[in-house]
Amino acid sequence: MKQAKPRVFDLSGAGLKPVVPGSVYMRHYFGSDMSVAFYRMQQTADAPLSAAPHTHGEELAIQLKGGATLQAGDKIYSLQQGDVYLIPPGLEHGGGASGFDGDEVEVLSLVTPARPEFGPEDEAGYFPTPGNAPPPTESKPGDVRILCNLNELSLKEVVPDQLYMQFWHGAESTIAITRMVRSETGMVPLSVNCHPEELCIAFSGRLNMRVEGEAYSFGQGEAFCIPPYMKHDGECVTDECLLLSWYTPDRRAEWGEESDELPAFSFLEE
């Protein structure tokens, strides 16, 4: 499972395998200390869809398509398409899709530490159902946090007309959404960066990356996984890039706690 080199993950939904026949299809990957799962789900009369209550490490989930009802602890959350939400480690949760008129529901799930129950990447994976869910464990206290909606972003300006950003901290992770825009002077230059493990998801645009001197490229529908503390830099080669980065462990020591004002990020060239 351990990752030694950077990798590009396909998050387009291609190559999904049935994990609950007729209802849930999945593809998953492993990083150094994370698991990444793309789920496509559909509720049918013959295959009612509901995730049995279960626990694991901290989870960042993105409601890519359709809605869902999530029960976590003693609370119920109604999730909409585009929602980005954080489930604390050890909080028992489950629920079902709530697409309309048989529409498919797609969810991207990122969990640290990695979920060994998924098995090898070339196998079907795992989805907790009443028939295969592990024995219940004591649920840790906590609340699900809906961080933002990708369709209604409100980002803070870091570099005028070129770079916009917002970030949040979880118990063991940091999440950042960044928009890079080509202005009259071009695209904002980024210097060499070195930090904990990162999964960077491209929702639009394409980036060329250099990691420890090796070249990589990824774009919309893909994610780039960078192992911990590998020196890297890159550039957006399209007119705009919209990215979500998930770092584990968190970057509190560098960025400070969340506030109304962004810190002076050290990864920007002067």
Image: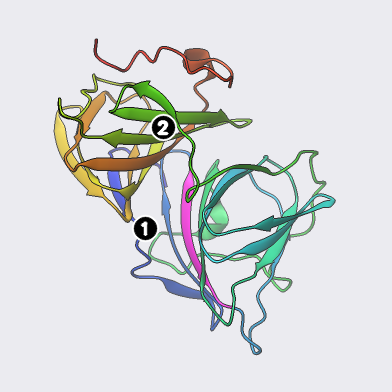
Q: Quadrant of residue 258?
A: top right
Is 149 left or right of 71, judged from the image as shown?
left
Expressed as whole percent of the image width and height from the top left, the position of residue 27 reads 43, 63
Q: Nearer the viewer, residue 269 or 187?
A: 187
Whether residue 193 appears in this view of the structure is yes
* In this view, 66 is above or below 36: below
Count of labels shown? 2
Q: Which residue is mark 1?
A: 11
Which amino acid is tagged 2?
Answer: Glu
Residue at the image position 41 percent from the left and 32 percent from the top: 197
- Provide the secondary structure element on which disc 1 rests: loop
- Give 120 or 9, whichever is nearer the viewer: 9
Left-right relation of 252 to 16: right
Does 52 appear in magenta? no
Q: Write down the residue under mark 2.
A: 197
Query: Circle 2: is it few (<14), some (14-19), or many (20+) Cα within 10 Å?
Result: many
Report whether residue 3 is seen. Answer: no
Q: CA distance from mark 1 to mark 2?
A: 18 Å
Residue 35 placed where, x, y %? Answer: 48, 48
Q: Which residues are magenta?
A: 34-42
Residue 102 found in image quarter: bottom right
Q: How busy is the neighbourhood of tag 1: few (under 14 within 10 Å), some, or many (20 plus)?
A: many
- The amino acid sitting under disc 1 is Leu
Q: Main secondary structure of the magenta part?
A: strand
Query: In the rendered image of this protein, does residue 244 appear above or below residue 184?
Result: below
- Spot occupied by residue 83 in the image (x, y as percentages of width and height): 56, 51
* Residue 165: x %, y % from top left: 42, 30
